[in-house]
Image (spheres, rainbow, N blue to C red):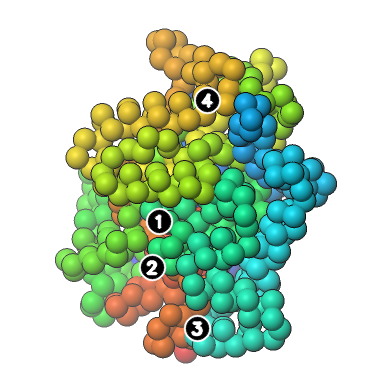
């Protein structure tokens, strides 16, 4: 290790690796410092249940926002596979169990499913018209995500071309998402299905005046202009391992088990003092890229961190290893189809309004909205061959309306209660409890792991467990001074965010890593 580099990157998560790859390929000397003993941060895959060779990602699962341009630029060998079923939402109608199924491959399957639910195909046509709005929005905005920020007024002008474009801008940017959901859609279950994309990870409701629900919704719908969420073959860890390969190939140096204790962000050069295996060391660089949150940077620099109320995280995660898939009460689709998409439970529109109100009052909702997803039905390569033969599967649950504040006072007990409630939500649609299907470790414990927002903050430093680091931002400059910037700038010269806390950061996208690298190269070129 040298004493001076062109660029030091703090945090070797996927965004830090993207930045390192671009900068190394540009001929700069790059050092990545990582606190963990592994590379990849929240995108890494791990053997969560040591008795079984199944590699799960604890925090990240599907890919939508990772631009094809970055994949091509860096020569990443990634296989992102389509899921046949986009979503499966069970319901009871006149005492009969049914399911609303949205297919990624067959439009007629989705249409028939809505007819079965509502009695006509009118809601299907309304849903198609509704989803045309984010499609039009993505078509105008997506390519700009890898460019300097466009002023809000200029971006609005780009939509002033025809009535559908103006409607997309008006509905998604200028008014609460609840307005357009209620304007376009009639069925409560369909409304709820649509609105879940506005809630995953953040604590919000349809008519939230902050419009954080709109921003979260757009994050889930604009990826690569389609918004489709795909399965990384080999698991999410393959994304980070491919990025590690390209970073190393570009000449970047990576150091793990690093305990950073001092940052110099105001001197002539940027400096980092740290310990590795008890040994003290220090390095300097012209540029410092920060792949962690604004809250962590504030601690290092002694500044006051002033979050917004919308920055609070609100997601409960459960990772499971199953010996077999559970049987469903609804017989219209086999379990292999129901669980290969996103399986929604207690996510009706009014149900989620109620659960938000109850969580706002400081208690776990009576009915806990959640969704589960089975990676191995689309890609079973994360399981070793014997487990595949025996019918094992992984299952991941995302619980909504589970804000950090609910868990802050008594995380252990509230986490246990929340786990029971979320599993009970799923079990109402099953012929047997999902607990009966769990693999069992040698010591007799079931293979299940739950993470509250408090656990996520403790493990990853994400403010109040927000999986986006902070509230998702608009894909344009809200303030005049942001226009023309890359959205990675800090108040310190040559210190840039390269992770989710940058503007247009969040999710597994690589976008802020790319943009931080472009900012560095822009500064060098003058």
Q: Which residue is mark 3?
A: 152
Q: Which residue is mark 1?
A: 204
Residue sitting at x 52%, y 66%: 179
* Label tally: 4
Q: CA distance from mark 1 to mark 2?
A: 9 Å
Q: Earlier in the sequence, mark 1 or mark 2?
A: 1
Q: Which residue is mark 2?
A: 210
**Label 4, residues with CA under 10 Å away: few <14, some 14-19, many ≥20:** some
Q: CA distance from mark 3 to mark 1?
A: 23 Å
Residue sitting at x 63%, y 66%: 134
**Label 2, residues with CA under 10 Å away: few <14, some 14-19, many ≥20:** few
Q: Tell me the element at label 4.
A: loop
Tell whether label 1 touches label 4 (CB within 8 Å). Answer: no
Q: CA distance from mark 4 to mark 2?
A: 34 Å
**Residue 267 vertical placement versus 299 (above, below):** below
Residue sitting at x 38%, y 53%: 203
Tell whether label 2 touches label 1 (CB within 8 Å). Answer: yes
Q: CA distance from mark 3 to mark 4?
A: 46 Å
- Say left or right for 133 vs 111: left
């Amino acid at each position: 290790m040298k004493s001076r580099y062109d660029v030091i990157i703090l945090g070797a998560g996927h965004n830090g690796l993207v930045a390192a790859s671009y900068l190394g390929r540009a001929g700069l000397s790059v050092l990545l410092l990582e606190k963990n003993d592994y590379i990849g941060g929240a995108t890494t895959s791990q053997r969560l249940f040591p008795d079984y060779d199944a590699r799960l990602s604890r925090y990240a699962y599907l890919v939508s926002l990772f631009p094809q341009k970055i994949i091509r630029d860096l020569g990443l060998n990634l296989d992102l596979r389509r899921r046949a079923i986009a979503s499966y939402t069970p319901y009871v109608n006149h005492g009969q169990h049914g399911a609303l199924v949205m297919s990624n491959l067959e439009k007629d399957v989705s249409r028939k499913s809505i007819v079965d639910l509502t009695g006509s195909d009118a809601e299907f046509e309304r849903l198609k018209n509704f989803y045309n709005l984010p499609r039009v929005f993505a078509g105008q905005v997506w390519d700009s995500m890898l460019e300097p920020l466009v002023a809000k007024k200029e971006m609005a002008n780009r939509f002033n071309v025809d009535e559908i474009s103006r409607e997309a801008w008006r509905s998604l940017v200028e008014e609460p998402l609840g307005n357009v959901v209620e304007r376009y859609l009639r069925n409560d279950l369909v409304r709820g299905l649509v609105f879940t994309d506005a809630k995953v990870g953040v604590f919000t409701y349809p008519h939230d005046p902050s419009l954080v629900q709109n921003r979260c919704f757009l994050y889930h719908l604009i990826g690569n202009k389609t918004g489709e969420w795909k399965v990384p073959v080999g698991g999410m860890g393959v994304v980070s391992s491919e990025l590690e390969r390209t970073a190393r190939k570009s000449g970047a140096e990576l150091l793990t088990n690093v305990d950073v204790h001092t940052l110099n962000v105001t001197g002539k050069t940027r400096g980092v003092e740290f310990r590795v295996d008890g040994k003290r060391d220090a390095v300097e660089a012209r540029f410092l890229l920060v792949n962690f949150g604004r809250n962590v940077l504030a601690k290092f620099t002694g500044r006051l961190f002033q979050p917004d109320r919308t920055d609070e995280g609100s997601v409960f995660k459960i990772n499971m290893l199953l010996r077999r898939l559970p049987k469903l009460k609804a017989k219209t689709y086999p379990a292999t189809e129901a669980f290969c998409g996103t399986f929604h439970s207690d996510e009706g529109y009014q149900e989620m309004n109620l659960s938000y109100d109850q969580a706002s009052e400081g208690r776990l909702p009576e009915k806990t909205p959640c969704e589960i997803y089975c990676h191995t039905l689309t890609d079973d390569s994360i399981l070793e061959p014997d487990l595949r033969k025996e019918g094992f599967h992984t299952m991941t649950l995302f619980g909504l309306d589970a804000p950090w504040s609910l868990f802050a006072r008594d995380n252990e007990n509230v986490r246990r209660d929340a786990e029971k409630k979320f599993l009970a939500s799923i079990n109402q649609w099953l012929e047997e409890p999902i607990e009966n299907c769990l693999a069992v470790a040698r010591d007799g414990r079931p293979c299940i792991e739950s993470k509250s927002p408090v656990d996520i903050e403790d493990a990853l430093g994400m403010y109040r467990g927000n999986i986006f680091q902070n509230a998702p931002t608009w894909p344009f400059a809200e303030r005049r001074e942001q226009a023309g910037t890359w959205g990675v700038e800090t108040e310190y010269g040559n210190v840039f965010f390269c992770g989710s806390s940058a503007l247009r950061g969040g999710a597994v996208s690589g976008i802020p890593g790319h943009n931080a690298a472009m900012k560095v190269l822009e500064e060098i070129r003058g």
